[in-house]
Image (spheres, rainbow, N blue to C red):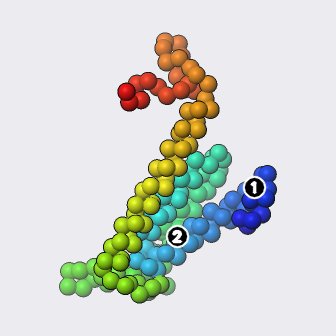
Amino acid sequence: MSFVASRSRFIPAWIQLAVIRLTLLGGAATSRMFGPLVMVPTLIATFTIVLQAHPSFRMRMATLGLGAIAMTVPALLELAGVLSPSYVFEHGNVVIVPHMLALPGPTAVTLLLLVASLMMLSVPCLFISRLRTALNEARPSCCYGPGCSGGWGGADPRLTSR
């Protein structure tokens, strides 16, 4: 699909939705690493938030709905007993039961979760920053005085740092 999309002037909605679905399916599948409540919600939220920059309102809403499904279904499947539980509660502790891989040790797991968290913070910030810069450069200049809506001008001087 990515090959077809990369060769097209216009990417059909069905390809876009298929890529979104497959990406969210992959995000949901990572719940088998640390359970549906560790890393997965942030991963899916990051992807879903970044896709809110899509020009189509319908695609944005579809992504929001599919993201909510991808975040919810793994936890519900565990609660229903369809998937084995990822968390064991014993002696006042919550123990993560990995299903996809063997955890190598506390240092490696901590570093993996730290790097993944930093990436999930950095990627959307950089994306939105570049988008905001492009929007600022694409908009015509506008005054921010009386009689001007200020809605399509450059950055409002009241919001920029000096």
Q: How many discs mark residues in the rendered view? A: 2
Please determine whether, in this image, residue 144 is positioned above or below residue 74: above
The quadrant of the rendering that contains the C terminus is top left
Which residue, given by chain and number where applicable, does mark 2 sit on? 27
Q: Position of residue 7 (x, y in %)?
A: 79, 59
Q: Secondary structure at mark 1?
A: loop
Q: Is residue 158 left or right of residue 134?
A: left
Q: Mark 2 packing: few (<14 Cα in 10 Å), some, or many (20+)?
A: many
Q: Report the residue at 68% width, 65% height from top.
A: 18
Q: Secondary structure at mark 2?
A: helix
Please determine whether, in this image, residue 92 is positioned above or below residue 152: below
Res 39 → quadrant: bottom left
Report the Cα–Cα distance between label 1 and label 2. Answer: 23 Å
User: Can I make out residue 113 in this image?
Assistant: yes
Disc 2 marks which amino acid? Gly
Q: Is residue 120 left or right of residue 135?
A: left
Q: Report the residue at 52% width, 72% height from top.
A: 28
Q: Position of residue 84 (x, y in %)?
A: 44, 86
Earlier residue among tags 1 and 2: 1
Please determine whether, in this image, residue 126 is positioned above or below residue 104: above
Q: Report the residue at 48% width, 14% height from top.
A: 145
Disc 1 marks which amino acid? Ile
Q: List the single residue furthest toward the top.
A: 146
Which residue, given by chain and number where applicable, does mark 1 sit on? 11
